Amino acid sequence: MTLLPADLNSLRLCDLDLRQSKVQSAMLGRPWRPGGSLRDFVMGLPRVLAADDLRAAADAMVAARRADRPVILAMGAHVIKVGLSPLIIDALERGLITGLALNGAGMIHDVEMALAGRTSEDVAEALADGSFGTARQTGEFINQAVAAGPQQGLGLAVGRALNQHPPANLELSLLAACARLGLPCTVHVSLGADIIHMHPSFDGAATGQASHVDFRLLVAQVGQLKGGVFLNVGSAVMLPEVFLKTLSAARNLGHTVKDFTTINMDMIRHYRPQTNVVQRPVLTGGRGLSIIGHHEINLPLLLAMALEGQAGL
C-alpha cells in the first residue's frame, strides 16, 4: 500500500480576528529609556509569565503590610552568601518583612559575617585534612549563647548575644537586627547537619529545646497568616517541611489560615518547595507563586518593587 500525502484543500480555516489568542499587543514589553525610574522599568516588563508573577508577588507583599498582615521570609544560607543580608535588614527596618525563618546554616553564616566580615569556607579543600567546620569562634559564640538561654529560642538567644557583645560587623547580622527590632527570627536545625554540632561546646539538649521554641514561635506567626505572605527563598527541604507542619499545627489550634500568598524563589524547581509551599498550603484559599532565577538578582528586584509599592510611588 502506497501512502499518499494528505490533501489539505478541505482544511477548515478560522478567522484570526475571532480566534482566541493568549498574547496581545497590550502585554508586550516596552524598551528601556536611559534615565528612567524603577517604576518605569517595572511598568515596561512584559505582562506575561514570570514578569506577571513578580508583580503579583510584590503586590501581595504590599497588600499584606497595608492590611497589617505578616510577611514571613524563610531562607536558606545561600541567600546570605550571595550578599543579600543588608537588603533584608533594610526591609525589616522599613516594616516590609515582619519575621525571618532560617535553617542552621543560615544562623552560622550570619554569625560569621558579624564576627569576621566573611564566611563560606572551601569545603572540598578543608574536608581533605578534617579542618572543615572547625572555626573555633563560630562554634563557641553560638553554642555558648544557646546554652545560656535555650528558653529564648535559637534566633533570639544568638541575636541578643550579638547585640550584647557587638562584634566588628554587627550591622551585617540578620539575627542581631531582628533582636534589636523586636521581630521574630526563628532557626530550625537538623541535629548533626551543621558544623557547630561537632564542636566540644555543643549542647544538643539546649539546641533541641531552643529550636523547638522557635518552631512554636513560627506556628504562632503562621497562625496569623490570613491575608499575609510566606516566602521560601533558597531552601529545598528543611524550611518547606517546617512550614507545612507549622501550618497544620496552626490550623489544628483553631486559626483560620487561608487566603494568603506563598512565594517560592529558587534557581531550579524542587519537589518540596513546589508542593509544600506553592501548592498544598493554598488549596483552601490563596495563591502560590514560583519565581525561578538567581537570588542575587530576583530577591533585590522583588524587594525594590515591594518597597516602591509600599511607599505609594
Image (cartoon, rainbow, N blue to C red):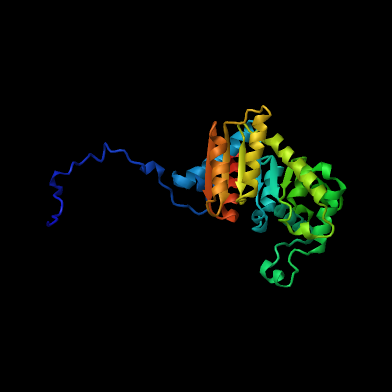
**Residue occupying the point 59% across, 54% down:** 295
- Residue 267 seen anywhere in this rendered image of the structure: yes
The spot of residue 234 in percent (x, y) is 61, 52
Q: Nearer the viewer, residue 160 or 239?
A: 239
Q: Which quadrant is home to the C terminus?
A: top right
Q: Horizontal placement of 147 versus 269: left or right?
A: right
Q: Nearer the viewer, residue 79 or 126?
A: 126
Q: Nearer the viewer, residue 10 or 313?
A: 10
**Residue occupying the point 70% across, 72% down:** 128
Circle count: 0
The spot of residue 270 in percent (x, y) is 54, 51
The spot of residue 152 in percent (x, y) is 82, 42
The spot of residue 192 in percent (x, y) is 73, 55
Q: Quadrant of the rendered structure where residue 210 is? A: top right
- Residue 311 seen anywhere in this rendered image of the structure: no
Q: Which quadrant is home to the N terminus?
A: bottom left
**Residue occupying the point 71% across, 47% down:** 188
Q: Nearer the viewer, residue 155 or 49?
A: 155
Residue placed furthest toward the front: 1
Q: Horizontal placement of 55 versus 114: left or right?
A: left
